[in-house]
């Protein structure tokens, strides 16, 4: 072991580390018969009946019923509000009648009761508030009795709108009041900010800790890791594993058994990738510590058009070998599911690694990275010309077609006298690998605009410091992931409790607002309004295909739109749908021209809808069955592990249930060992020569 290095005793150059149930050793295996199984089933049935009985009694304690009495009006409000928090809705005080200054009867209603009153001033409002009232009839009414108590005389439990799940309940207005009045209630908005507690294995739990992906070298490492770095890494992993039951990490060692690269991930990242992993951006521009160790992050975009993290990496270096290991390890963690498109920085090593590991994935250079790199390369030009930054930004972000892009580029070069600039010449030669107008056939989920608006590197710098030691770096990255997940949770809540205002009350927009998330609907609505500002005329027909020319007002170019009546297929030359995943204004103009008032189902991509995460990970995990057999061991382990973790978490709450679970698990273990022993005996033994 070299001085200052960290040595790990291992015969392998790669370690995949997870948390799982410990095996039982030193016990003689014993089989179990059908009678024992029957007894276990009876015990399980008795326990189930007992549990159901307790749950029914518990439920009766907090579900309102007509006839329940309260000492005061506030007691009734608190009771109904606590019930509302468990169900998932907010309440407010409604009708109230008094006699001689004393409340005679009072109604508490769902906050979605009624409808917003019409205000004639709304026509002058630029940004309308989302609609939150749905005419919900859920309510609870109380009336004063002769004994001075208040009795529930009306209770309507049904709602005409979705209720929120428990992890979002703290966003409800009336629940904020409840939480602030109880010292033992934890504000979930704080638990996501750097907290590592909670069951992070639940893909829907916002309190997940972050996961990183860390690479390795297969050759001898030339520089050594700081003496405490390896220990800090393992200390962090040891801390994370008990707190996050689905936490996984992989270390790669060099030939001297020294840690070079590390990879880690949790269940939320796997779940997010299952929903939104069609487009992945690999960011490798950030550096940490004095050795400038590259920090890489796999970033995607969710259905709210927010950045989500699929994983991250601390790289030893930026060689082809490092990136090959990174991509392979990432794919293993994601059950072999490959993205449709990957955007990366302009590095030759990354391009070669993508070609080797992801040959079927469309590879594009990240246009935001091109923009940032150009700022560094041409800093003197940016500082010396006020118009260059505007022209260059327009050229790479705002051009809609190749003709416009070429004209804008030529005008920029000519205006600033940069025809002989070597960097711009190189960019122009590679334009088809990064320019948006040449990549419209590759689905990118509008991730370029998200990078532009959120500036991922600035977000990282807001949490991470290049001088941080590794342990502090991990903690800060954990905060970053928690904050991003909190924003997603809040967006989910807002989506479930309100509806965006329609700028035009037309059927197409009503359909769109019912299926798309608010952020995607806003994008769709802009396209629809663009379509209204276009002229359309029919060019001809070929069989069932009609050809249209659509020209935006005050523009000199036209777009060609074809519509096939036999299959209701519509295609526009701007490729907006292929690139972003929503229909463009030109296509919507043609649909309106043909009196089609609903979005054809084939043009509704699930990843943009409100139900993008509705079915958990069924499809994603089902696809794991197609993975190479080399990954089946890990897959089987994860499937079994998650089931046994759930059993342990529930059984530990009760002495008799725990005893039952232990007894059953011992018998199950013995049965498994018997089956394995039988399989081993049936196979041909291998003898040493």
Image: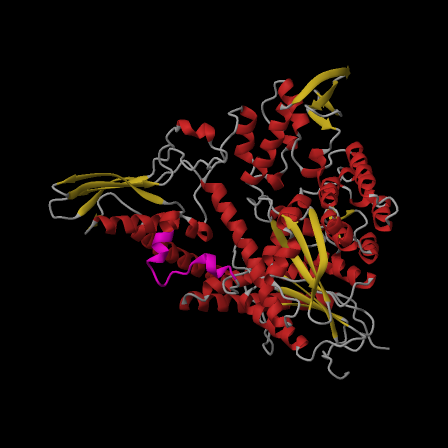
Horizontal side of residue 426 vs 133, given as left or right? right
Which colour style is shown?
Answer: secondary structure
Horizontal side of residue 678 vs 148, given as left or right? right
Report the number of discs: 0
Horizontal side of residue 505 vs 294, given as left or right? left
Residue at 78 percent of width and 66 percent of height: 317
Please identify the residue farthest to the front as the structure is shown: 384
Q: Nearer the viewer, residue 473 or 622?
A: 473
Q: Position of residue 463 (x, y in %)?
A: 59, 62
Q: Is residue 612 above or below residue 376?
A: above
Residue range corresponding to the magenta coloring: 176-193
Q: Nearer the viewer, residue 121 or 442?
A: 121
Q: Is residue 534 visible?
A: yes
Residue 628: image quadrant is bottom right
Residue 332: image quadrant is bottom right
Residue at 76 percent of width and 15 percent of height: 541
Q: Nearer the viewer, residue 1 or 426?
A: 426
Q: Position of residue 506 (x, y in %)?
A: 53, 24
Q: Position of residue 125 (x, y in %)?
A: 47, 32
Horizontal side of residue 196 vs 300, given as left or right? left
Q: Is residue 477 above or below residue 149?
A: below
Residue at 73 percent of width and 20 percent of height: 548
Please tell me whether residue 191 belongs to the stretch shown in magenta.
yes
Q: Position of residue 388 (x, y in %)?
A: 75, 44
Please identify the residue farthest to the right as the structure is shown: 420
Q: Is residue 686 above or below residue 270?
A: below
Q: Quadrant of the N terminus?
A: bottom right
Q: Is residue 203 visible?
A: no
Q: Is residue 163 above or below residue 627?
A: above
Please tell me whether residue 411 belongs to the stretch shown in magenta.
no
């Amino acid at each position: 072991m070299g001085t200052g290095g960290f040595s790990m005793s291992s015969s392998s150059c790669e370690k995949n580390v997870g948390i799982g149930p410990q095996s039982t050793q030193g016990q003689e295996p014993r089989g179990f018969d059908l009678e024992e199984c029957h007894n276990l089933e009876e015990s399980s049935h008795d326990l189930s009946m007992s549990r159901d009985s307790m749950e029914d009694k518990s439920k009766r304690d907090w579900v309102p019923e007509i006839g329940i009495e309260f000492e005061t009006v506030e007691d009734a409000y608190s009771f109904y509000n606590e019930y509302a928090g468990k169900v998932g809705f907010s309440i407010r005080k409604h009708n109230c009648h008094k006699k001689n200054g004393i409340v005679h009867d009072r109604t508490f209603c769902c906050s979605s009761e009624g409808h917003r009153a019409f205000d004639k001033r709304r026509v002058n409002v630029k940004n309308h508030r989302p609609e939150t009232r749905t005419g919900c009839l859920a309510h609870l009414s109380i009336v004063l009795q002769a004994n001075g108590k208040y009795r529930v005389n009306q209770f309507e439990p049904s709602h005409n709108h979705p209720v929120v799940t428990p992890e979002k309940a703290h966003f409800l207005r009336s629940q904020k009041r409840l939480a602030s009045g109880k010292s033992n209630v934890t504000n979930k908005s704080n638990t996501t900010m750097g907290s590592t507690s909670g069951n992070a294995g639940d893909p829907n739990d916002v309190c997940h800790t972050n996961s990183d992906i860390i690479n390795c070298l297969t050759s001898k490492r030339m520089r050594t890791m700081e003496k405490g770095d390896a220990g800090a890494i393992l200390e962090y992993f040891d801390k994370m594993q008990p707190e996050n039951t689905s936490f996984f990490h992989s270390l790669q060692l060099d030939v001297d058994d020294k840690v070079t690269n590390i990879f880690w991930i949790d269940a939320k990242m796997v779940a997010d990738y299952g929903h939104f992993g069609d487009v992945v951006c690999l960011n490798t521009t950030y550096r940490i510590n004095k050795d400038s160790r590259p920090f890489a992050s796999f970033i995607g975009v969710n259905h709210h058009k927010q950045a989500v993290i699929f994983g991250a990496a601390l790289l030893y270096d930026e060689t082809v070998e490092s990136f090959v290991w990174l991509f392979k390890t990432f794919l293993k963690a994601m059950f072999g599911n490959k993205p449709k498109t990957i955007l990366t920085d302009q590095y030759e090593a990354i391009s070669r690694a993508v070609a080797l590991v992801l040959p079927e994935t469309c590879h594009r250079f990240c246009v935001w990275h091109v923009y940032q790199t150009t700022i560094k390369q041409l800093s003197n030009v940016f500082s010396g010309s006020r118009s260059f930054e505007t022209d260059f930004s327009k050229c790479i972000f705002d051009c809609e077609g190749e003709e416009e892009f070429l004209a804008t580029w030529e005008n920029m070069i000519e205006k600033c006298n940069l025809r002989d600039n070597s960097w711009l010449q190189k960019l122009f030669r590679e334009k088809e690998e990064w320019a948006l107008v040449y990549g419209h056939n590759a689905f990118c989920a509008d991730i370029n605009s998200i990078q532009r608006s959120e500036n991922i590197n600035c977000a990282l710098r807001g949490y991470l410091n290049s001088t941080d030691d590794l342990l502090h770096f991990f903690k800060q990255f954990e905060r970053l992931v928690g904050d991003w997940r909190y924003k997603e949770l809040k967006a989910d809540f807002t989506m479930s409790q309100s509806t965006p205002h329609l700028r035009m009350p037309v059927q197409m927009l009503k359909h769109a607002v019912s299926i798309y998330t608010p952020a995607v609907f806003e994008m769709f609505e802009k396209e629809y309004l663009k379509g209204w500002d276009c002229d359309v005329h029919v060019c001809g027909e070929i069989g069932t295909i009609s050809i249209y020319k659509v020209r935006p007002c005050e523009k000199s170019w036209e777009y060609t739109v074809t519509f096939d009546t036999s299959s209701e297929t519509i295609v526009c030359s701007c490729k907006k749908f292929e690139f972003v995943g929503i229909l463009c204004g030109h296509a919507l103009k043609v649909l309106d021209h043909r009196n089609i008032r609903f979005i054809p189902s084939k043009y509704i991509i699930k990843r943009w809808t409100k139900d993008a995460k509705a079915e958990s990970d069924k499809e994603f995990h089902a696809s794991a069955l197609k993975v190479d057999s080399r990954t089946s061991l890990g897959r089987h382990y994860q499937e079994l592990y998650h089931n046994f973790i759930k059993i342990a978490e529930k059984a530990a709450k009760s002495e008799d249930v725990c005893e039952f679970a232990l007894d059953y698990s011992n018998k199950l273990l013995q049965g498994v060992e018997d089956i394995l022993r039988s399989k081993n005996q049936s196979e041909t033994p291998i003898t040493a020569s």
